[in-house]
Image (cartoon, grey):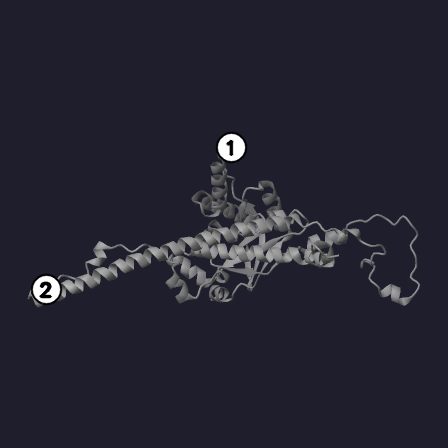
């Protein structure tokens, strides 16, 4: 009864322990620029997935070569590690050992590293589909962006596959007809859950009891009652101009994200050209079938007039072969990745656009 009620309660949020965050950040940083993956364990409490421990998957050992093909193969193997048979056995053994020492031993998903927000890939979708279908339906994928986090902004996000996309992925049919019937778009692939970082009470008490250096100067007594109620930890506004805000240099992450966005748009254009080529091929074959059927009807009319047996009119299925429609899955994933890059560009340009408008007269030619 409790299990049925738990399954009916949808996942609303993800709560990650601070120690788990440190383990994920350390593993992803050490493996960068290669893809790092690992398993996360915890428990589900009233719709909140609490992640209490994690362990990385073993690294894939390949012979050291300078070939670009081998480096791509190593990256693909690392990205596909969560669903490999060897790592599935390794994960089962690790969870069994954790259970022996009274640690949360329920698999709640996996984590992966990303670079500049590039995580919407076929490997990521296959891994999450494997976890939601085979391991446990209530699992999440935690994505850690190493490049963004290296600049002091921790980027940690939790995703799940939507039920509609899970149904379509099980069927394996991503044609135009099936997408129109299911009304599935790139926005329906992933569901992002709010993620919070949690510290244990023991750690919080330790942080509050950390000794601080005694003040070197004599403390000034408050002059008024308002001074006592004022929070001393609130920083005062600076009394001098901040010259860093006048720097007009564009964020290098903005430039790299724009390059990746252009690459994704080119990929989308290639997929569109392939689909248009399929439509042209289909139109030519259907025109041939129509001409053949018209010719066969004319022949049968003549044979009937001559009191002869008419020829079968369904032979076109054997004579003509219609081209197979390419899968629209890659186009869906690429569209979702374009949306991700667009959001990043929107976030980066918030500060740059204000500076450009402030010095607009100096940027436009012929104006002073």
Which residue extends farthest front?
Answer: 366
Query: Would you say residue 19 is visible in this rendering?
Result: no
**Residue 321 as seen in the image, left or right of residue 75:** left
Distance of label 2 from label 1 (alpha carbons):
71 Å
Q: Would you name the residue on which mark 1 appears?
A: 66
Check the image and report above or below for 45 versus 254. Answer: below
**Residue 357 as seen in the image, left or right of residue 326:** right
Look at the image and tell me in which quarter the C terminus lies. Answer: bottom right
Check the image and report above or below for 104 versus 191. Answer: above
Residue at image position (84%, 47%) is 213
Query: Dot 1: what SS?
Result: loop
Q: Closer to the N terminus: mark 2 or mark 1?
A: 1
* Residue 272 place in picture, x, y as percent: 44, 55
Residue at image position (55%, 60%) is 192
- Please say if the residues under marks 2 and 1 sit with CB atoms less than 8 Å apart: no
**Residue 68 as seen in the image, left or right of residue 308:** right
* Residue 5 place in picture, x, y as percent: 49, 67
Query: Would you say residue 43 is visible in this rendering?
Result: yes
Q: Nearer the viewer, residue 104 or 154?
A: 154
Q: Would you name the residue on which mark 2 appears?
A: 303
Residue at image position (45%, 51%) is 270
Residue at image position (25%, 59%) is 289
Q: Nearer the viewer, residue 119 or 141?
A: 119
């Amino acid at each position: 009864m409790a299990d049925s009620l738990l399954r009916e309660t949808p996942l609303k949020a993800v709560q990650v322990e601070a120690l788990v965050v440190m383990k994920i950040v350390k593993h992803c940083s050490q493996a960068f620029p290669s893809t790092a993956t690992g398993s996360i364990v915890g428990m589900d409490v009233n719709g909140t997935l609490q992640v209490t421990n994690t362990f990385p998957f073993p690294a894939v050992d390949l012979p050291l070569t300078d070939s670009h093909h081998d480096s791509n193969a190593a990256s693909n193997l690392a990205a596909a590690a969560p669903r490999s048979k060897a790592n599935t056995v390794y994960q089962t053994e690790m969870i069994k050992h954790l259970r022996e020492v009274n640690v949360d031993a329920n698999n709640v998903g996996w984590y992966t590293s990303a670079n500049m927000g590039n995580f919407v890939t076929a490997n990521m979708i296959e891994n999450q589909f494997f976890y939601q279908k085979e391991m446990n339906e209530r699992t999440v994928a935690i994505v850690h962006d190493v490049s963004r986090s290296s600049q002091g902004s921790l980027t940690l996000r939790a995703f799940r596959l939507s039920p509609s996309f899970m149904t379509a992925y099980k069927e394996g049919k991503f044609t135009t007809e099936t997408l129109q019937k299911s009304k599935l778009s790139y926005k329906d692939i992933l569901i992002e859950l709010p993620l919070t970082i949690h510290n244990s009470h023991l750690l919080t008490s330790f942080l509050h009891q950390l000794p601080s250096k005694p003040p070197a100067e004599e403390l000034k007594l408050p002059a008024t009652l308002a001074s006592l109620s004022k929070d001393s930890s609130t920083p005062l506004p600076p009394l001098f101009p901040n010259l860093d805000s006048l720097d007009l240099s564009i964020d290098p992450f903005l430039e790299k994200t724009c390059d990746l966005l252009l690459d994704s748009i080119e990929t989308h254009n290639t997929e569109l050209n392939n689909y248009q080529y399929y439509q042209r091929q289909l139109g030519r074959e259907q025109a041939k079938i129509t001409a053949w059927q018209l010719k066969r009807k004319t022949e049968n009319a003549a044979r009937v007039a001559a009191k002869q047996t008419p020829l079968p009119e369904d032979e076109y299925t054997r004579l003509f072969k219609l081209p197979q429609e390419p899968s629209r899955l890659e186009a869906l994933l690429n569209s979702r990745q374009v949306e991700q890059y667009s959001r990043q560009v929107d976030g980066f340009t918030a500060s740059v656009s204000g500076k450009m408008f402030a010095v607009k007269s100096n940027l436009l030619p012929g104006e002073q």
